[in-house]
Amino acid sequence: MKDPTALTLRQAAAAIAQGELHAEALVEACLDRVERLQPVLNCFISVTGERARQQAREADAAVKAGRALGPLHGVPLAHKDMFYRAGRVSTCGSKLCKDRIADVTAAVHERLDAAGAVDLGRLNMSEFAAGPTGHNQAFGHCRNPWNPAHVTGGSSSGSGAAVAARQVFGSLGSDTGGSVRLPAAMCGITGLKPTYGLVSRHGIMPRCWSLDVVGPLARTALDCAMLLQVVAGPDARDPTTIGHEIPDYVALANRSVEGMRIGVPTNAVFADVDSGVKAALEESVRVLKDLGAKIVDVELPDTRVIYGLTNLVNKAEAATIHARWVRTRRDEYSLSAVNRFEAGFHIPATLYLDAVRVRGRLLAEFVERAFRSVDVVHMPVLGIPVPTIEATEIHSTADVPQLMERITRHTRWLNYLGLPGLSVPCGFTPGRLPVAFQLMGRPFSEARLLALAHAYQSCTPWHRADPREHLRA
C-alpha cells in the first residue's frame, strides 16, 4: 500500500483485520509523519513511539493467530493531554502539571484499549482546556495544517490538527463550549459533541462539571460513529452518564435521509457570517435538499440569552476548580487562562444557582420550539474565516470577551442545553481555509446527525481534502 496514512479510520481497521496491512507498518507511517510535521504543526506534547510499536506488534500477532479482534484493532490514535493514564504524566496543557503523574486511567482510554486501538501519544491543547483558538504559552501554539500562520481552534487543538494532517486516524477531545467542533471546523475534519451524559468523564481533567462532554474527531462521519460506538455508554464511576442502551451508530449512519426535515434558522445572529462562509453553508443546504431532505425555515429561541447563561456557569465552575492554584500559583498560568478563571470569583452564588435551576425548563422549551417541525437544525460552526494566530493573541483582559464571542457564538450555548452538535466540513473560503456547517439535534439523536453527515459526505469531496500539499509532506 503506497501511503496507508491516506486511509480513513474505517478503511485502516478493515485492512488490518483482513491482513492487507500490518499494524506495525501503519504505526511506522504515522510516526514518520509525526516526526516530520512536529516542527511545523506542534500537535504533540509527547510521543509514545516504543509503546505504540509494541502494541502494533501484538496486534499483528493477534491477526496472524486468528484471535478475536476489536473494532479499532491496530489503528493509531492520539488524544488530548487531559485523558489520564495511571502512572503517566498528563500535563493538561499547562506547566503547572508538567510533572503531575495520574493515579487513574480514563474510562475512554480503557474502552479504546479494549477495542484494540494503538495510542501514539499526548496531543497539544489550550491550557486547562480554556481557550477556543488553540493558543498555548507553555508548550507552544498548535498550528493549522492548511496554513500554519492560522489557529487550529481549541481547546482540542492537537486533536484537530493531527487528524487533519494524517498523523493519526482519530482522536478524542473534550467540548465545554465548542472545543471539539471548532478544531474540527477550522482543520477541515468531522467532530462530534455528544449529548451530555453519553460518554463517561471518569479520569479526565474537569473544565466545567455541568458543561463538559467527550467527543470524537475523525476524517468522516462513519469514523466518528465507530469511535462513539466504542466510548459511549454508562459508567458507574461517572454518575452523570445515562444508563440506556447504546444503538449501533455505524449501521444507523448508513440509513437513508430522504424526507428528513432540516431546519435553517432565520434568527439574525445566524445570518451575520462572512460572505465566503455563507456561500459554502448555502451550498451545503442545497446538497442536502438534493439528497431528499426537506428544508424548513425555523426561528430558534434567542440563543444570545442562553449564551450568557452558559458563560455564567462556565466561569463559576472553572473558578471553583482552579481557586486554590489561582491564589497560590497565579504567575504560572497564561494570561488568557487566569483571566477567565478569575472572572468566576465575582459571580454571586445566587446567580450561578439560578442559571443551573432554570436549565431544565429552558431545555424543554428550546427542544419543543426548535424541533416542533424539524428533525435537525443546520447552522454555522464558525461564522468568520479561520483567523491567524497573531490576530487572536490575548494582550490584555479587555481582549477576552469580544474574541470569545466572535469564535464561540454558534457553539457555546449547546453545552448549557446539553444537546448534540456535529461539525461537518463543507468547503473553503477564498483564502483556502476550511468551512464547516453544524448539525444540532434533540438529546441522544447522534445517529440521525451522523446519518445526515454521512449522506452529505457520500456525494461531496470536502472531507477528503488533504492539506499535505501545503505542508510538503
Image (cartoon, rainbow, N blue to C red):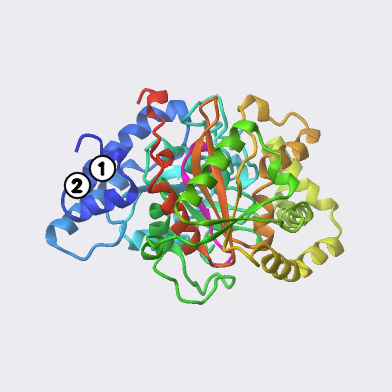
In the visual, does 27 lie left or right of 186? left
- In x, y percent, where is residue 349? 84, 62
Query: Which amino acid, mark 2?
Result: His
**Please, what secondary structure does the residue beneath circle 2 have?**
loop
Residue annotated with mark 1: 26
Asked whether 304 falls inside the magenta stretch, the response is no
- Residue 88 visible to the viewer: no
Residue drawn at x 71%, y 57% as measured from the top left: 300
Q: Quadrant of the C terminus?
A: top left
Q: Residue furthest bottom?
A: 244
Query: Which amino acid, mark 1?
Result: Leu
- In x, y percent, where is residue 124? 51, 40
Q: Which residues are magenta?
A: 185-197
- In x, y percent, where is residue 472? 37, 22
Q: Quadrant of the N terminus?
A: top left
Residue annotated with mark 2: 22
Q: Residue furthest left?
A: 65
In the visual, does 57 lie left or right of 106? left
Residue drawn at x 44%, y 49% as measured from the top left: 456
**Please, what secondary structure does the residue beneath circle 1 have?**
helix
Q: Which mark is residue 186?
A: none
